[in-house]
Amino acid sequence: MTAPTLLRPHDKDLGGGFKVRRLLPAAQRRSVGPFVFFDHFGPATETPDTQHDVRPHPHIGLATVTYLFEGAMMHRDSLGSVQEILPGAINWMTAGRGIVHSERKPERLRADDYVNHGLQLWAALPQAFEEVEPSFTHTAADAIPEADEQGARVRVLIGEAFGLRSPVKTFAPTLYLDIALPAGTSFVLPALAPELAVYPVDADVRIDGVAVEAHTMAALPAGQGATLSADTAVRLMVVGGAPLDGPRYITWNFVSSRRERILQAGDDWAAQRMGQVPGETEFIPLPGHPFQVQSPAPDTGTTPA
């Protein structure tokens, strides 16, 4: 059996000292299923003096997927959606032809100390849906199906697995699991999707006998599952799905199969033609003068993003 490809994080500062571990895209692997972006933030202690609000910014051609382990954040977007994001819920925002959103500290927590910890992923939309109307869907934690499987607690955040089906609607076959694996146990992960990766959030794990450190993504060989085992309790995230239907340009907050669409989005944002978040006056300006579009990575045996 072929060993998994190990993707180690690189740190990114999103401003104000708020750092994330970025796993996708990576040089060795540009995407896993539809997922072209994988950020793990925290645990980070928020105090009344910290300023980690993310000002309004645009997206096209993708869906953001936000999932918290701890903490809270307030989502607002140009559709008028206002939603406090809490642990265990799935928040799926389809950018499609274009959306603007902000993520800020909830007003009720402005004077408090608390911990923010979670993941934000981007799923590239299939080419046929890249220009779909934007939308935002919140699925509460108690609506996410979960069950005991092989002695582990499994939550099916997106997709279908182990006889459970998430209510979250997607545009392509997509899988996203949260597995709590007890100490000293093993878990057989079937080949639930053509492309799969496993990410240990808080402890080391062994994948088919290969040691994988916490915060390292293990991309499994195409069409294969794996046996997961750990000496200590560990939280594992599984992502995957069907391969992308062609390469993607990814520049700043924009994803598209067409370079010219990225350039158009840059022009639209610079001219403030992509909409506004009601009640917001700030925004993140377009980076770069002129705006540069990165080319898709050459094919190295895995699906490029």
Image: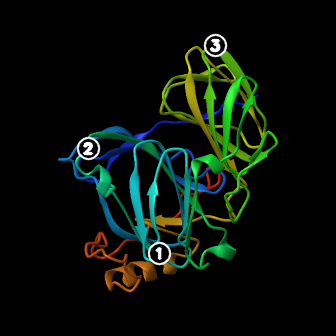
C-alpha span from label 3 to label 1: 45 Å
Number of residues whose C-alpha sits closer than 10 Å to that of mark 2, classed few (under 14), some (14–19) or many (20 or more): few
- Image coordinates of residue 142 in percent, x first then y, are 62, 47
What type is the residue that disc 3 sits on?
A: Gly
User: Can residue 301 be seen here?
Assistant: no
Identify which residue is drawn at 50% across, 24% down: 203
Q: How many marks?
A: 3
Disc with the residue nearer the chain's start (3 vs 2): 2
Looking at this view, is 143 or 271 the one in front?
143
What residue is shown with label 3? 184
* In this rendering, position of residue 29 left or right of residue 79: right
What residue is shown with label 2? 112
Identify which residue is drawn at 32% across, 81% down: 270
C-alpha span from label 3 to label 2: 37 Å
Looking at this view, is 202 or 291 the one in front?
202
What residue is shown with label 1? 99
Number of residues whose C-alpha sits closer than 10 Å to that of mark 1, classed few (under 14), some (14–19) or many (20 or more): many
